[in-house]
Image (cartoon, rainbow, N blue to C red):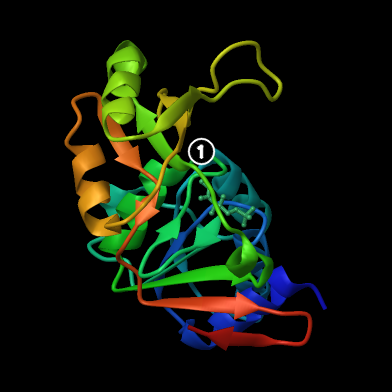
Amino acid sequence: MDAKLNACMGAMKYLKDGMVLGLGTGSTVFHFINLVGEEMKKGKKFVCVATSFDTEMLAKKNGIPIVSLDQVSKIDLAVDGADIIGKEYVLKGGGGALAREKVVGYFADKFLVVVDEGKLKLKSYPVVVECLPFAYATVMKAMENLGAKPKLRSGGGKVGPVVSDNGNFILDCEMKITNAKKLEQDINAIPGVVENGIFTKFSKIIVGTESGSREL
Ligand code: 5RP
């Protein structure tokens, strides 16, 4: 079976009827959203906050009610993918949804990261930074001062810079990570930065393989 699906199957034991869910973004959590839809067809009830337009559309297709963050007082469980698994951190933002993903994941009582085991083998991935379009040049300079080689993300069905669901630019920053927690804070202290893709706060990583899943 698909390792991404297996990772999401592994997350299903944390799902309880009536929960408020945070739904991440990407090809792994895609399976979790479909599984939540199946549970709803069996009569379970969930209310969900989506971290991107893509996730919102998929959830609606599955009959999952989507609410905005200001309509819930808590999120019981957030489930999301990641691009690479580091030591005490994960890197996210491949899909450009990192800002909403961090808001939802960090706010949730439980935040599960679901990945296929290929993500454990990857050696490097850029630190993704979402920034105000107005400030992209100064943010790039500040990222260089932190030792990064930043690139403005572009392409993919549009000429010019990729614009996030929040109307911002995305920078892919090749850099070394030695102290992830400090770097996460240092990047967010740059004026014009909205959020970065270093995630140091999560409950569990669930790794899917072809035959099942395991927890880290
Ligand atoms: C989007 C993300 C995704 O969670 C991350 O890119 C993993 O995606 P996939 O499950 O498709 O590999 O951070 O911003």
Q: Position of residue 160 (x, y in %)?
A: 59, 11
Q: Position of residue 211 (x, y in %)?
A: 77, 87
Q: Nearer the viewer, residue 107 or 7?
A: 7
Does residue 82 show up? no
Q: What residue sits 36% from the left and 76% below the top? A: 203
Establish whether ligand 1 lies closer than 8 Å to the Cβ of label 1. Answer: yes
Question: Please, what is the three-letter code of the amino acid marked with disc 1?
Answer: Gly
Q: Quadrant of the N terminus?
A: bottom right
Q: Nearer the viewer, residue 80 or 41?
A: 80
Looking at the rendered structure, the secondary structure element under dot 1 is loop
Q: What residue sits 71% from the left and 80% below the top? A: 209
Q: Residues within 10 Å of mark 1 (few under 14, many from 20)?
A: many
Q: Position of residue 132 (x, y in %)?
A: 32, 21
Does residue 216 show up? yes
Q: Is residue 75 left or right of residue 126?
A: left
Q: Which residue is mark 1?
A: 96
Q: What residue sits 44% from the left and 29% below the top? A: 149
From the viewer's perspective, is residue 113 above or below residue 159? below
From the viewer's perspective, is residue 99 above or below residue 86? above
> For residue 35, which quarter of the picture?
bottom right
